[in-house]
């Protein structure tokens, strides 16, 4: 049967035969292929194929992981459909005409300075935080009254495990004006700092950022800071997924706005001990305190 120019077919159901519209799936796939911005997830930029999903009422194409977050928000926020598993009507297709580009132009119009959208390698908790802010709270539709500063991305001291070669050591860590400060405890307590700048890469531990089941990243409670050459500068293990989100947002905000903002740094030779033995150490004078290190380059 033909109805309003659309192909239709009879299906049997619990209440008997009923008529439903179908065969609009190819049309929505054509919309997806027509714009390159639709070939990546609107929320985490994961590459998409014909097995992609859509949040129809937002007119966006998304990956299966982000679809799970959208579904958890409820149908009053997001209405999800599969591009190849669900039947699409002409009305559904009409909602997708703007695609990812139009949706982002509205819902991501005013992302705060230093706020970095998640990627496909990021933990699900960070993607969920972004999706809730973007679609539930409409946090990026209007500009903030005051743009974030480097100080806005500070993080209060909390308990962490400082990881080295797969082993953890109890520590307290915080972020102050673009600098990570770590104080270890135990038999030989020590402290050190890592200055964040635009060249630093901040994310979850690399071994967990690799794809897991169904090409999804395996989530961990580990965060890592790497240099521009890929060397690991800092690796911490936190206690909860909420802390992972807080650390990644603060680290990335600090890296986006920060620089090696020490007041002064250099080599300092001091006399120590009863024998007044000379000791040469690298010092960094930062607004948060004075720090000494064995080597340069923190």
Image (spheres, helix red, strand yellow):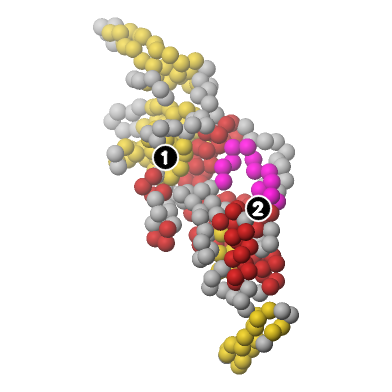
Question: Magenta region, mostly helix, strand or loop?
Answer: loop
Q: Nearer the viewer, mark 1 or mark 2?
A: 2
Depicted 64 relative to depicted 134: above or below: below
- The answer to whether residue 160 is visible is no
Q: Furthest-bottom residue in view?
A: 16
Residue bounds of the magenta highlight: 104-117
The residue pinned by badge 2 equals: 101
Q: Relative to residue 297, is residue 274 drawn left or right?
A: left
Q: Are marks 1 and 2 in contact (CB under 8 Å)?
A: no
Q: Quadrant of the N terminus?
A: bottom right
- According to the picture, the residue beneath numbered tag 1 turns out to be 224
Kindly report the distance in space between the C-alpha atoms of the residues bearing marks 1 and 2. Answer: 31 Å
Residue 293, position as x, y percentages in the image: 37, 21
Residue 257: mark = none
Query: How would you rate the neighbour count of disc 2 (Cα within 10 Å): few for under 14, some for 14-19, many for 20 or more?
Result: some
Task: Please tell me which of labels 1 and 2 falls first in the chain.
Answer: 2
Pick whichever, 134 or 185, lies toward us: 134
Residue 256, quarter of picture? top right
> Relative to 91, is 270 on the left or the right?
left
């Amino acid at each position: 049967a033909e109805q309003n120019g659309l192909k239709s077919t009879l299906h049997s159901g619990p209440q008997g035969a009923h008529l439903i519209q179908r065969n609009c799936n190819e049309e929505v796939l054509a919309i997806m292929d027509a714009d390159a911005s639709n070939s990546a997830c609107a929320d985490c930029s994961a590459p998409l194929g014909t097995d992609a999903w859509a949040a129809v009422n937002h007119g966006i194409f998304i990956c299966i992981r982000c679809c799970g977050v959208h579904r958890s928000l409820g149908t009053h926020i997001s209405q999800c459909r599969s591009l190849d598993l669900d039947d699409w009507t002409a009305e559904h297709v009409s909602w997708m005409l703007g695609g990812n580009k139009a949706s982002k132009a509205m819902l991501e119009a005013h992302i705060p300075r230093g706020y970095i959208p998640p990627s496909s390698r990021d933990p699900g908790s960070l993607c969920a935080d972004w999706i809730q802010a973007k679609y539930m709270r409409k946090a990026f539709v209007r500009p903030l009254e005051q743009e974030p500063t480097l100080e806005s991305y500070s993080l209060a001291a909390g308990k962490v495990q400082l990881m080295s070669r797969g082993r953890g050591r109890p520590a307290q860590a915080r972020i102050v004006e673009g600098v990570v400060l770590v104080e270890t405890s135990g038999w030989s307590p020590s402290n050190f700092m890592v200055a964040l700048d635009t060249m630093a890469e901040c994310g979850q531990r690399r071994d967990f950022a690799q794809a897991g089941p169904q090409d999804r990243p395996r989530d961990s409670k580990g965060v890592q800071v790497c240099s521009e050459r890929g060397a690991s500068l800092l690796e911490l293990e936190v206690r909860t997924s909420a802390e992972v989100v807080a650390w990644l947002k603060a680290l990335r905000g600090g890296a986006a706005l920060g620089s090696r903002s020490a007041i002064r740094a250099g080599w300092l030779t001091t006399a120590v001990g009863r024998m007044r033995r000379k000791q040469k150490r690298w010092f960094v004078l930062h607004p948060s305190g004075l720090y000494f290190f064995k080597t340069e380059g923190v």
